[in-house]
Image (cartoon, rainbow, N blue to C red):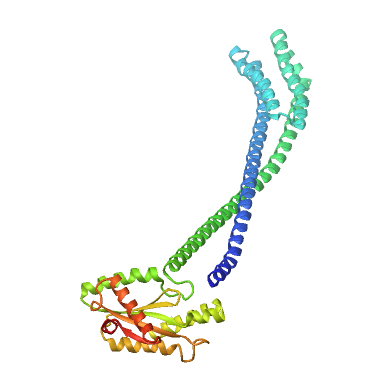
Amino acid sequence: MQMQAARNRLTRKVFPLETKLLAAFVVGALGLVAAVVLAATQGSAYLAADHEVGRLRDLDHAVTALYLAVRSAESGQRGYLLTSRDNDLTPYRIARSEAAQRLDDARALAGGDPGTLAALDAMRPHVHARLAELSETLDVFNRDGFDAAQQVVATGRGSGEMKAIRDSGEAIHADLAKRATAMQARQRDHFDDTLRSIYVGAALALMLLALVYAALAMETAQRRRMGERIRREADHDELTQLPNRRFFTHWLGYALALARREGSTLGLLCIDIDGFKKVNDTCGHEAGDALLVEIARRFSALKRDSDVLARLGGDEFVLAAVGASNGKDLARLAQRMIDSLDDPPVSRPLVGASIGIAFFPDDANDLPGLLATADAAMYAAKRGGRNRVVFHAVAEIA
């Protein structure tokens, strides 16, 4: 009953801690998953923002390249008008071709951006008109000469188209710069959120590792305590907490082997409680158990530190005194053990003790023989009137 109560106390003490650890682990794991998902989401948003910033930058470069291509076409055409050499016309032809390509590139980079597409579509007629005016001027130059070409230029039509191209390009640049600045700010926010999520995830991962370590440490400690308790239960009497027959037999075998090797002696007291059955019959088994616990306590208080007191079962105890060779000393110890049952009375009805004493190697030189001789002496004490001490040597003579 006492052992079961101890188990219940242990369970009540440990279970809440295990529950808290499990709850903390679940919460930490869910938090870690959330942190990982958030980090992945923010990381993806950061990459998307970075891609968008790159697209806006490339689009801005394409618009700039378009304007420069038209200007290059202008410069090439003027160079030809001044020199009339065919080689000087090559830059014009290249720039004209590039202008068309740059316009297509800009539209491709604009993608599904309706505002930029609309701005590029508004710029397209001016680009075409400017390129057409340059081509028309060349045709007039080749057909009618330089002065006629200068008259076409003097109309200012080409200058107006270039101004429209430049104004459209600057408007697109301003819009792209504004959008890129906003996107970069969002990109920084996503980057910061990603870092925070990673930090939180790392902290939660460390917490989970700490929880796992704590759980493993707790499990190890519980197993160790359980192992110690199992070993103690296997070697000790559950009621009196004295060594039991199993432990005492093993220990006595080792003690006898050591005494044999060293040439020393050992005294063994076999103790049987007189009147114990009457206590059980009249007062009940719970009273009998309480009596055995009190007897064990009183006997333990009388023995030497080197002596081993054990309960063999029922109302039978045994005490081994290593190195004992003086019968008088053991007799005094045995008598004090008997007297301890009456001072004050350990129970009502009164009980006593019959004690038999045997020595190694004088009375027996092995474990079974020593136990048998001490037991025989104890029974001789019972036959002699109980509540007394009898040595095996005396019992044999009698």
* Closer to the camera in the image, 349 or 194: 349
Instruction: Determine whether, in the image, residue 145 is placed left or right of residue 14.
Output: right
Q: Quadrant of the C terminus?
A: bottom left
Q: Is residue 90 above or below residue 378?
A: above
Q: Is residue 120 above or below residue 181?
A: above
In the rendered image, the residue lying farthest to the bottom is 343
Q: Quadrant of residue 254?
A: bottom left
Q: Position of residue 337 (x, y in %)?
A: 40, 86
Q: Quadrant of residue 231?
A: bottom left
Q: Is residue 304 visible in this depiction of the protein?
A: no
Q: Quadrant of the N terminus?
A: bottom right
In the rendered image, the residue lying farthest to the top is 143
Q: Is residue 109 above or below residue 316?
A: above
Q: Is residue 314 visible in this depiction of the protein?
A: yes
Instruction: Determine whether, in the image, residue 211 is placed left or right of residue 186.
Output: left
Q: Position of residue 390 (x, y in %)?
A: 33, 85
Q: Position of residue 247 (x, y in %)?
A: 38, 69
Residue at image coords 65%, 35% = 57
* Closer to the camera in the image, 365 or 216: 365
Instruction: Determine whether, in the image, residue 228 is placed left or right of residue 133.
Output: left
Q: Quadrant of residue 246?
A: bottom left
Q: Position of residue 312 (x, y in %)?
A: 41, 73
Residue at image coords 65%, 28% = 65
Residue at image coords 79%, 20% = 155
